[in-house]
Amino acid sequence: MKFRLFAVAALMIAALCGCSTSAKKNKTLVFYYSQTGATKAVAEELQSQLGADIACIEVVEPYNGDYAATVARWRREREAGVKVAIQPLAVDLDQYDTIFLGFPIWGGTFASPMATFLDDHSLAGKTVVTFATFGSGGIDSATADVAAAQPDAKVIKGYGVRNARVAKAPAEISRFLIENGYVEGEIAPLPEYGEAVPVTDEDVAVFDAACGDYQFPLGTPVTVAKRSYDGTQDYRFDVKSQTRDGGEALSTIYVVVPQGGTPEFTQVLK
Ligand SMILES: Cc1cc2nc3c(=O)[nH]c(=O)nc-3n(C[C@H](O)[C@H](O)[C@H](O)COP(=O)(O)O)c2cc1C
């Protein structure tokens, strides 16, 4: 009885704080943590396109919205090995066999509150499809970390988007869900990238237009592979950069030039 009262109270609190869940039984749950709203926007789009339930993680002492202050607190907590306290879940995970698990990328992996959740809850036997928002990238490494944290779940890399491009998410999510069979529908497959060839001055101009104003230096493009469809041109650059200790690092940077639009930096893979 006590537990029931607690569960009802938790559901009411969740509804009041904008982190809602539906009472209807549904096999798919969109479950996320978002500090400044980018991941929340993606989660809500996924919920709407999937027709799924939705719930989120609330931190006991929320991070404030200031980027520098959050980075400073996150660093302090990481160095001290602090496990960030989260509120009891307002959802019964047992009802779901597929969970779309979303988070912002912090330090190249899932944000600390998601780390607490993954530490405290088992997703054994479930299919977990990750999604993430980020300044530059990190969903691949974060997905590998989710798989390591939940070895008995089937963890699949899902949809990732830079926070600067969240407005593009609805169309990209629609393609992602159809291509991967999460919703029914038909969509023409995208062509393969061509062969990687040395960059021309024109390619470098596209790279600079897309990446030049990013807050950290992203390196120098060396080779590029391209593909085009429906007036859109995709670029996959191989990029060289310097590590802090003076060594050389290689990364892959994706850029899209939409029809009639300007170059957009979509993601870096390291
Ligand atoms: C503490 C902290 C660390 C971050 N680390 C990374 C990072 O390693 N790579 C990255 O691309 N973005 C990083 N970001 C940017 C966030 O991933 C990005 O702003 C995200 O979209 C925020 O999502 P939210 O609005 O749902 O909280 C970091 C942000 C914070 C606050």
Image (spheres, helix red, strand yellow):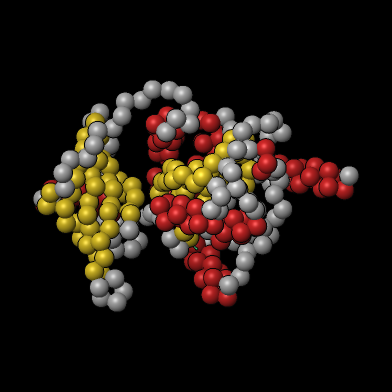
Q: Quadrant of the N terminus?
A: top right
**Image location of residue 185, percent across then percent down:** 43, 23
- The residue depicted at 17 percent of the width and 40 percent of the height is 194
Counting every numbered tag in the picture gives: 0
**Image location of residue 77, percent across then percent down:** 57, 71
**Image location of residue 163, percent across then percent down:** 43, 49
The quadrant holding residue 239 is: bottom left
Q: Is residue 242 above or below residue 171?
A: below
41 horizontally vs 174: left or right: right
- The residue depicted at 59 percent of the width and 55 percent of the height is 118
- The residue depicted at 57 percent of the width and 38 percent of the height is 98
**Image location of residue 129, percent across then percent down:** 50, 43
Is any part of residue 270 visible from this angle? Answer: yes
- The residue depicted at 25 percent of the width and 75 percent of the height is 246
Q: Nearer the viewer, residue 129 or 223?
A: 129
269 horizontally vs 71: left or right: left
The quadrant holding residue 230 is: top left
Q: Nearer the viewer, residue 169 or 180?
A: 180
In the displayed image of the protein, which residue is found farthest to the right?
Answer: 1
Is any part of residue 35 visible from this angle? Answer: no
Q: Quadrant of the C terminus?
A: bottom left
